[in-house]
Structures are given as C-alpha cells and as structure tokens.
Amino acid sequence: MYKTRTDENQKDIVEKLRKAGCKVWTHGNGTIDLTVKYPSCGIAFMVEVKKGNQESAHKKLTNDQKKFFGDFVGCGNAFITTSAEYALKEMGLVKKKYAANNEGFDKGE
C-alpha cells in the first residue's frame, strides 16, 4: 500500500479549474485525486494529478492507479494531468491557448 500524498501542483490545478467554472472534489483514496465536473457538460471526469511533464506522467502511477485506469480505458472521462491547461483540453473546455485571465475558455454559453 502506498502512502497517499498530494502532488505539489494539485492546488494550482484545482484553483485554475474552479476559476474556469468547474466543480472540483478532491480525494485521497490512492486511485484518483480529483473528480471534476463542468456544469454545462453533464459529465464528471476522474483525474489523477502528477507532477512533471505530461508525456511521462503515466509512468508514475502506482499499481492501484494502473489498475484503475486500466478499467477505464476507452471510457473518455478518466485521465492523468500535470496541468490545468491539459485537464481543460481533455474535458473539451479550451478553444485556444490557456490564459490565466480565463480568456479562451468555452463556458458553455
């Protein structure tokens, strides 16, 4: 069993997702870190936060996380992220390059 810890970039990701209008619930159960829902899309996303670069994030999964994501392959609503920008793209909420002032977010309006 792994000791759960929060990746140092999680707080920033949560803040930016909330600023973009997402509802975010944090977990510490050892499989996923966040459940994220954008009000107008009707889908909840299961998100694991990893630090570092996106290309190698999947290499840092625990055995429980590998099993969890293996069970959700092809589901489309479970993913691993290292940034709020990547998470918003995976959720289909970014029209253009992420900007800290929320320009470029598709808020479903």
Image (cartoon, rainbow, N blue to C red):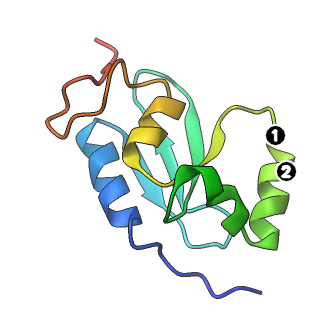
Question: In this orientation, which residue lies closer to the viewer: 57 or 106?
Answer: 57
Q: Rate crowding at label 2 as few (under 14), some (14 to 19) or many (20 or more) other CA atoms within 10 Å.
A: few
Q: Is residue 37 visible?
A: no
Residue 39: x and y in percent read 40, 28
Q: Is residue 41 above or below residue 83?
A: above
Q: CA distance from mark 2 to mark 1?
A: 5 Å
* Residue receiving disc 1: 73
Residue 30: x and y in percent read 66, 73
Q: Is residue 28 above or below residue 106?
A: below
Give SS at disc 1: loop
Give SS at disc 2: helix
* Residue receiving disc 2: 70
Mark 2 and mark 1 residues within 8 Å of each other at the beta carbon: yes
Residue at 47 percent across and 41 percent down: it is: 87
The quadrant in which the C terminus is found is top left
Residue 68: x and y in percent read 79, 57
Amino acid type indicated by mark 2:
Gly
Q: Is residue 85 visible?
A: yes
Residue at 77 percent across and 52 percent down: it is: 69
Amino acid type indicated by mark 1:
Val
The quadrant holding residue 12 is bottom left
Residue at 49 percent across and 63 percent down: it is: 52
- Does 96 sit left or right of 102 as displayed? right
Residue lying at the far left of the rendered structure: 101
The quadrant holding residue 63 is bottom right
